[in-house]
Image (cartoon, grey):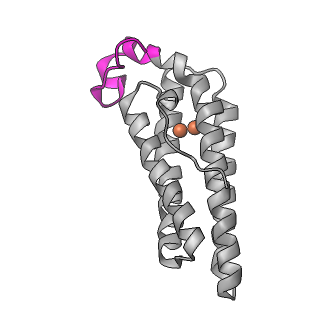
Amino acid sequence: MPQARWRKQMELGYEPLDNEHKEFFEVVQKSTEASQVGDFATMEWVFDKAYDYARDHFSHEEDIMERIHFPDIEAHMRAHQIFIKNISELRQQYEVASSEEDKGKIAVKTANFLNVWLLGHILSRDKVYKPYLVRLRNLPPRMNYDGKVLEEGQ
Ligand SMILES: [Fe+2]
Ligand SMILES: [Fe+2]
């Protein structure tokens, strides 16, 4: 199973989004550990967190992309929607699984999906809007999310 680990090269240079990404890496790491030992209580937590993350982080990211007029926003939003659909389907499968063995298999499938998705999405999709984040600097303070300023050199 690929292990999604946070690396410096994944940084967007905008702290609020970087922190959210790091938080998701922790959830994904938990899914790897829990699926390997059949820790079902933690898997329930993973499903909850992954879903909450998707809802909160995606809307934060989409709101920013809109304000900086990121041109490829539609395709990016579709990718987010597909994630929500996939994780919801996995959760459904997990909940109706009648044996521990089946639950275990779906847990492994879920951990795999989360690891692959997170690496692929952050490295290939989120990276694309990174150069546009500089536009946040030029927005009026009210629009400059959380009043945070981009790190110098980004
Ligand atoms: Fe994204
Ligand atoms: Fe993201």
Q: Position of residue 6 (x, y in %)?
A: 49, 40
- Locate residue 10, reporting x and y percent: 52, 31
Q: Please say if 82 is above or below 40.
A: above
Q: Residue at x 53, y 51 (%)?
A: 54
Quadrant the C terminus occupies: top left
Left-right relation of 94 to 39: right
Q: Is residue 30 left or right of residue 143?
A: right
Residue 140 colored magenta?
A: yes
- Residue 120: x and y in percent read 66, 39
Front residue of 80/17: it is 17
The residue lying at 67 percent from left, 32 percent from top is: 74
Q: Quadrant of the N terminus?
A: bottom right
Q: Residue at x 53, y 17 (%)?
A: 132
Furthest residue to the bottom? 99
Q: Nearer the viewer, residue 7 or 69?
A: 7
Vertical comparison of 75 with 41: above or below? above
Q: Nearer the viewer, residue 33 or 106?
A: 33
From the top left corner, tell me how far across and down residue 41 is, in percent: 48, 77
Q: Is residue 113 one of those drawn in magenta?
A: no
| Residue stretch rendered in magenta on the structure | 134-154
Q: Going 61% across and 24% down the picture, which residue do you hit?
A: 128
